[in-house]
Image (spheres, rainbow, N blue to C red):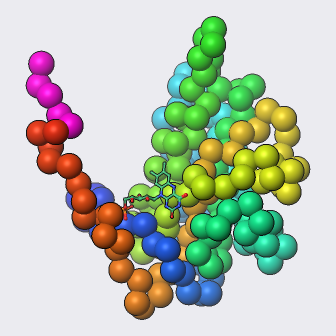
Amino acid sequence: MEFEKVIRKRFSVRKFKNDPIDNELLNKILEAGNLAPTAKNNQPQKIYVVQSKDGLDKIDKASPCRYNAPVCLIVASDKNLAWSKENYSTYEMDACIVATHMMLEATNLGVDNIWVEMFDKNLLKQEFNLGENIEPICLIPLGYKTDDCTPSPMHNKRKDLSEIVEYK
Ligand SMILES: Cc1cc2nc3c(=O)[nH]c(=O)nc-3n(C[C@H](O)[C@H](O)[C@H](O)COP(=O)(O)O)c2cc1C
């Protein structure tokens, strides 16, 4: 799909069918994340692919926002690996860029998705035995939207460019 189409087609899907995602597509999505730029190329991201019943139940304990997706990515970042300076670290920024790459590649491949930050970080870390240094940044439920799923009203509410762009 042309990039222009991908960014215009993407919207947050909050109602998924049970249909699984083909492994080949899933791998392409993960590879797109792997191509993302990270500070100093440190690649602190850790991606957990959750698709077992047990794993999805754990996601549901920590978040109300899986929306029945058959696969849920936990996009996390290793604070010990990310580029840092004094009190500043790019661990979150790096993981967000990785997540964006994966979201857009998913859309490109016809796999619906949503970015979720509403989850209990401590509970998620506990449920998945994530190390002290591993910080979950977002969840990306992946799958295929139900036939009646349409973009939420928020989707089309975009500020005018003049409100957010200034030429200096
Ligand atoms: C950082 C971030 C966090 C978000 N967290 C959630 C969330 O926890 N639950 C949810 O349903 N949607 C979440 N969303 C989706 C946004 O609500 C959505 O992207 C926004 O309303 C624009 O709609 P659109 O994605 O359909 O264009 C999140 C999006 C971003 C970028």
On the rendered structure, is 165 left or right of 39? left
Rendered view: 167 above or below 8:
above
Q: Residue at x 75, y 25 (%)?
A: 80
Tell which of 6 and 122 is nearer to you. 122
**Quadrant in the picture for residue 48:** bottom right
Image position, residue 139 (x, y; %):
61, 57
Whether 89 is drawn above or below 106: the answer is: above
| Residue plotted at (85% across, 57% down) | 127
Ligand 1's image quarter is bottom left
Which image quadrant for residue 154? Answer: bottom left
- As rendered, which of 64 and 99 lies closer to the eye? 64
Q: What residue is rendered at 49% in x and 67% in y?
A: 113
Task: Give the magenta part as a residue range.
Answer: 164-168
Whether residue 158 is in magenta: the answer is: no
Q: Residue at x 77, y 66 (%)?
A: 61
Main SS type for the magenta part?
A: loop
Q: Residue furthest top?
A: 86
Looking at the image, residue 156 lies above or below residue 45 = below
Point out the image quarter for the N terminus.
bottom left
Does residue 14 appear left or right of residue 72 in this picture? Answer: left
Residue 23 visible (yes or no): no
* Rendering coords of residue 17 (x, y %): 56, 86
Q: Nearer the viewer, residue 58 or 18?
A: 58
Q: Look at the image and tell me in which quarter the C terminus lies.
A: top left
Q: Say left or right for 24 vs 146.
A: right
47 or 87, which lies in front? Answer: 87
Residue 24 image offset from top left, x and y in percent: 59, 71
